[in-house]
Image (tube, rainbow, N blue to C red):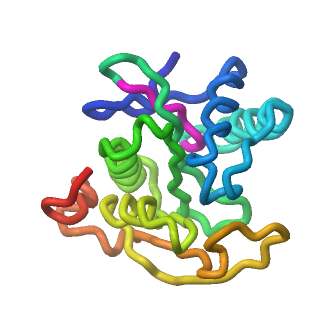
């Protein structure tokens, strides 16, 4: 399988039509889904008919972007995925950064490592002008990763969800980093706060 991006400890690859089980398993953990669905799993039918076909179609529409399966380089274990893609109807040059990792991968710096590498590549190689990331305001772990990847809080907003989950009353937050805000060295990309934990 072709590698999309390699870091010290991660290899990111495009998903294939054979990856249904990986996604079903990832989305079956209530803790992984806590800030997305309130802990409800994504059903197999939804993965087969909507989620995975959407990822594959995304590669056709935007070949340099999309959702990418993350594997540990040391043992080849599936760790989750990273998203780096333009949003439908979004401004030219803007991409969304996202990540969803298995619980066993939490707290080991993988989300930060992958996010930083994607942001660097986006600005250095892919013509990205602005990177955004969105999460629930109460999702402090994800917000910390966004900050360590160089993004900064730009707004808090509220959406009218048909089935609100716990914490939704505090709203959502958007973080962003623009090319104009990069340090003069630019190509090195954001490195986050010195001494920040992984």
Query: Which quadrant of the structure image shows residue 28?
Result: top right
Q: Which residues are magenta?
A: 65-72
Above or below, comparing residue 109 to residue 193 in the picture: above
Residue at the location (20% across, 60% down)?
A: 196
Residue at the location (45% across, 71% down)?
A: 176
Q: Whole-percent x and y of residue 153?
A: 43, 78
* Near-viewer residue (161 or 8): 161
* Near-viewer residue (106 or 89): 106
Residue 17 located left or right of residue 121:
right
Q: Whole-percent x and y of residue 70?
A: 47, 32
Q: Extreme left residue here?
A: 195
Residue at the location (72% across, 60% down)?
A: 88
* Near-viewer residue (52 or 35): 35
Above or below, comparing residue 70 to residue 184 in the picture: above
120 drawn magenta: no
Above or below, comparing residue 189 to residue 132 in the picture: above
* Near-viewer residue (185 or 172): 172
Q: Whole-percent x and y of residue 120?
A: 33, 51
Residue 165 located left or right of residue 102:
right
70 drawn magenta: yes
């Amino acid at each position: 399988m072709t590698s999309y991006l390699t870091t010290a400890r991660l290899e990111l690859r495009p998903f294939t039509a054979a990856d249904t089980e990986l996604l079903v398993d990832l989305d079956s953990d209530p803790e992984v889904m806590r800030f997305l669905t309130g802990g409800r799993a994504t059903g197999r039918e939804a993965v087969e008919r909507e989620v995975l076909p959407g990822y594959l179609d995304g590669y056709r529409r935007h070949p340099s972007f999309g959702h990418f399966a993350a594997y540990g380089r040391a043992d080849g274990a599936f760790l989750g995925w990273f998203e780096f893609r333009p949003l439908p109807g979004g401004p030219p040059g803007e991409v969304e950064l996202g990540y969803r990792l298995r619980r066993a991968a939490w707290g080991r710096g993988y989300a930060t490592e992958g996010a930083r590498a994607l942001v660097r590549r986006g600005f250095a190689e892919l013509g990205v002008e602005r990177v955004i990331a969105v999460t629930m305001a109460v999702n402090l772990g994800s917000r910390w990763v966004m900050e360590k990847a160089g993004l900064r809080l730009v707004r808090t907003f509220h959406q009218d969800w048909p089935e609100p989950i716990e914490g939704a009353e505090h709203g959502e937050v958007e973080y962003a980093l623009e090319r104009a805000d990069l340090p003069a060295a630019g190509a090195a990309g954001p490195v986050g706060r010195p001494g920040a934990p992984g």
